[in-house]
Image (spheres, helix red, strand yellow):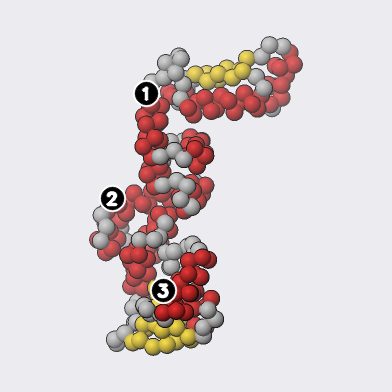
Amino acid sequence: MTDILKDILISDITTNPNQPRQIFKEEDIKALAESIANNGLIQPIIVRPSDIIGYELIAGERRLRAHQFLGKSHIQAIITQKSYQESMKQALIENLQRADLNPIEEAKAYQNIIDKLGMTHQELAKSIGKSRPYISNQLRLLQLSSSWQTAIEEGLATPGHARLILPLSKEEQNFWLTEITGHQISVHQLEKSLKKEDKQPTSKEKTIFQNHLEEELQKSLGLSVSISGFQQKKGHLSITFSNEEEFNRIINKLK
């Protein structure tokens, strides 16, 4: 059966549960609504007959939202007979071609298709015209903490930053997230800092992260703290006290 173009009731449309885009900015919807009000809808949305009732949206949620913002009851749509699997793929490709999905949305969309359609990284890459390493690298972003993912979604950090910190411990990742967002550290600057930390520190040279940990412990205890052997993942934590009161403070903190 061929696709058909017709006006359909907006109330008959169910949004796509596999929509890759998770964030819809209100100002973008308002701007699109103004454009539609002045120029009409240039590109129809795409829907498929729902398995229950009405239609399921495949592509065009921003256009649909703009119509709802304008208070319209109907919207022009291409009604296609695509299967559930085909509609998932088309929704992803439609958004990727616009190149405005944020990296986390893109990674979640890939993972959604892999989970629901049982595709390998190689099969997915081939079906959407990407390389297998590209798909795998994007999916690695989902290994990040929710704080890191939010920072990338908001543009405060980039996938380039993320790939550099992924091998680090969670504590180090959180430390560098604070540094990156607080001081606008570029990917190049982060790479240089991490390379410097990879070098074996001498007794007079400590990593930025090590100094940060010492400062945090000193603030908490109110005493001098020194960490050694940090790069070898084993070593000594020294806390200096000068009287019984300071010693008791350490004991109480440890308890």
Image quadrant holding the C terminus, namely top right
Q: Amino acid at mark 3?
A: Gly
Residue identifier under label 1: 199
Q: Amino acid at mark 2?
A: Pro
Q: Nearer the viewer, residue 140 or 116?
A: 140
Q: Residue at x 47, y 79 (%)?
A: 37
Is residue 228 rendered to the left or right of residue 248? left
Q: Residue at x 33, y 87 (%)?
A: 4
Q: CA distance from mark 2 to mark 1?
A: 29 Å
Q: Amino acid at mark 1?
A: Lys
Nearer to us of marks 2 and 1 is: 1
Q: Quadrant of residue 190?
A: top left
Local crowd size for mark 1, using a 10 Å CA cut-off: few (<14), some (14–19), many (≥20): few
Q: Secondary structure at mark 3?
A: loop
Q: Secondary structure at mark 2?
A: helix
Q: Does residue 213 sit above or below 19 in this rendering? A: above
Q: Nearer the viewer, residue 229 or 128?
A: 128
Q: Nearer the viewer, residue 36 or 217?
A: 36
Is residue 151 rendered to the left or right of residue 127? right
Q: Does residue 30 sit above or below 147 in this rendering? A: below
Q: CA distance from mark 3 to mark 2?
A: 29 Å
* Spot occupied by residue 127 in the image (x, y as percentages of width and height): 27, 64
Q: Secondary structure at mark 1?
A: loop
Image quadrant holding the N terminus, namely bottom left
Q: Residue furthest front?
A: 38
Q: Residue at x 35, y 65 (%)?
A: 98
* Spot occupied by residue 87 in the image (x, y as percentages of width and height): 36, 73
Q: Which mark is drawn over residue 60?
A: 3
Q: Which mark is drawn over residue 133?
A: 2
